[in-house]
Image: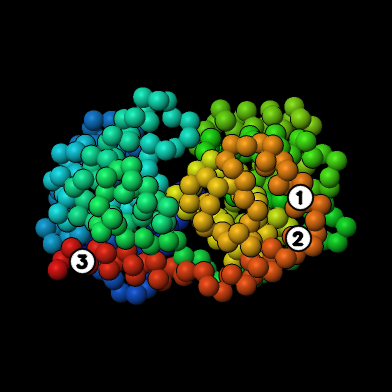
């Protein structure tokens, strides 16, 4: 297979932001005639066995010599340096966010992944980062030369403007993202527990099988603070259900501790929703300050105060919603994103 060989570990259909980005690149390239194909790597990354690492190496090294290898960072950051060096001259590493910065890792795992990714990135001919924040992080903490990094922010599809909840109904808060420690849902529930006197309901949409123990703990926390009738854990949903949730939302909430970009923030902006988010990672820059009230990551009191301010200020919500709908017109589109990545890959042929 020549052209671009896009190596991605695991199940490409999984409902995560990283996989959604990868799927869209492949779809846009098909539509625009870019020669590209998907190479499935073993699914255990970023913690593969020795046999899975060997299998990944065999697959990559077996590709046509004139193919450009675009490798998703979920795998690339865990590659042994010898493999990264072997494919380096024709490799573009796609970094959504550094593996060692995932919340919930043991200190040993964090150190191992950071060292592994730093070593592997020495050898990539080019790097694609999904945000300016990640680009700066790679330069400052992973010693990647700035001139080797291209930023390709996720695109957004045009969307209908959210209509919000029905008159007189509870204000609908919406959070979207897999139930993993980095998303900060436990802190969101803790913050909302102090706002039970206000009239709201919360829907959390996102895969709930990534960390079953955390999911169960979150259910227990919701029950313990008496919010079982106001918080819906919807799990992963289909596109039409997600669209309906956005349409009925009054406020989008993202309590993440760290984001490499925060695709759901621009999805909310595209629908004209006011936002409450943290400043964790790229989230600080993804949504305009005119749209999003931003609080420090991990600060439950600040999160509670921000929620209270927006829930009790309809005029403020409307102003942020208007700013979001105006900003939606200038959001990047997926065709642009895919073109940037394809051009970065093409430079390796020159």
Earlier residue among tags 2 and 3: 2
Query: What residue is at 66 percent from the left and 36 percent from the top?
Result: 300
Earlier residue among tags 1 and 2: 1
What residue is disc 3 on? 347
Residue 34 occupies which quadrant of the picture?
A: bottom left
146 or 167, which is in the foreground? 146
Answer whether labels 1 and 2 touch (C-beta < 8 Å). Answer: yes
Extreme residue toward the left, this view: 65
Side of 54 relative to 231 (left or right): left
Q: Nearer the viewer, mark 1 or mark 3?
A: 1
Residue 148 occupies which quadrant of the picture?
A: bottom left
What residue is disc 1 on? 309
Earlier residue among tags 1 and 3: 1
Work out whether residue 39 can be spotted. no
Answer whether labels 2 and 3 touch (C-beta < 8 Å). Answer: no
Real-space CA distance between mark 2 and mark 3, rounded to the nearest whole angstrom: 47 Å
Q: How crowded is mark 1: few (under 14 residues within 10 Å), some or many (20 or more)?
A: some
Query: What residue is at 56 percent from the left and 27 percent from the top?
Result: 213
Quadrant location of the C terminus in the rendered image: bottom left
Query: What residue is at 84 percent from the left and 45 percent from the top?
Result: 198
Q: Where is residue 136 in the image (x, y as percent from the top left)?
A: 37, 51
Q: Residue 301 carries which label?
A: none
Query: What residue is at 85 percent from the left and 55 percent from the top?
Result: 169
Real-space CA distance between mark 1 and mark 2, rounded to the nearest whole angstrom: 9 Å
Q: Is residue 168 above or below residue 109?
A: below
Badge 3 marks a residue whose secondary structure is helix
Badge 2 marks a residue whose secondary structure is helix
What residue is disc 2 on? 316
Side of 269 relative to 136 (left or right): right
Badge 1 marks a residue whose secondary structure is helix
């Amino acid at each position: 297979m020549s052209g671009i060989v896009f190596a991605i570990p695991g199940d490409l259909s999984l409902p995560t932001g990283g996989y959604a980005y990868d799927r869209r690149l492949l779809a846009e390239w098909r539509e625009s005639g870019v020669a590209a194909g998907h190479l499935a790597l073993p699914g255990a990354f970023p913690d593969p066995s020795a046999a899975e690492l060997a299998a990944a190496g065999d697959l990559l090294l077996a590709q046509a010599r004139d193919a450009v290898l675009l490798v998703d960072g979920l795998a690339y950051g865990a590659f042994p340096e010898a493999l990264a060096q072997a494919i380096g001259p024709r490799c573009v590493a796609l970094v959504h966010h550094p593996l060692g910065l995932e919340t919930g890792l043991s200190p040993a795992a964090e150190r191992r992944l950071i060292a592994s990714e730093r070593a592997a990135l020495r050898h990539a001919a080019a790097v694609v980062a999904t945000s300016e924040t990640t680009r700066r992080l790679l330069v400052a903490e992973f010693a990647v030369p700035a001139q080797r990094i291209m930023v390709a922010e996720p695109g957004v599809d045009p969307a209908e403007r959210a209509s919000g909840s029905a008159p007189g109904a509870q204000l609908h808060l919406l959070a979207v993202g897999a139930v993993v420690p980095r998303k900060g849902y436990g802190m969101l529930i803790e913050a909302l527990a102090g706002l039970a006197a206000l009239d709201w309901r919360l829907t959390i949409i996102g895969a709930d099988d990534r960390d079953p123990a955390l999911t169960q703990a979150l259910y227990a926390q919701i029950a313990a603070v008496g919010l079982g009738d106001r918080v819906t854990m919807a799990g992963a949903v289909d596109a039409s259900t997600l669209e309906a949730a956005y349409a009925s939302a009054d406020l989008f909430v993202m309590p993440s501790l760290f984001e490499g970009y925060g695709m759901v923030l621009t999805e909310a902006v595209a629908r004209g929703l006011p936002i409450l988010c943290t400043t964790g990672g790229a989230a600080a820059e993804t949504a305009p300050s005119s749209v999003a009230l931003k609080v420090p990551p991990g600060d439950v009191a600040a999160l509670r105060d921000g929620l209270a301010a927006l829930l009790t200020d309809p005029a403020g919500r409307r102003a942020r919603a208007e700013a979001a709908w105006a900003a939606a017109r200038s959001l990047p589109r997926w065709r642009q994103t895919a073109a940037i990545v394809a051009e970065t890959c093409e430079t390796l042929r020159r």
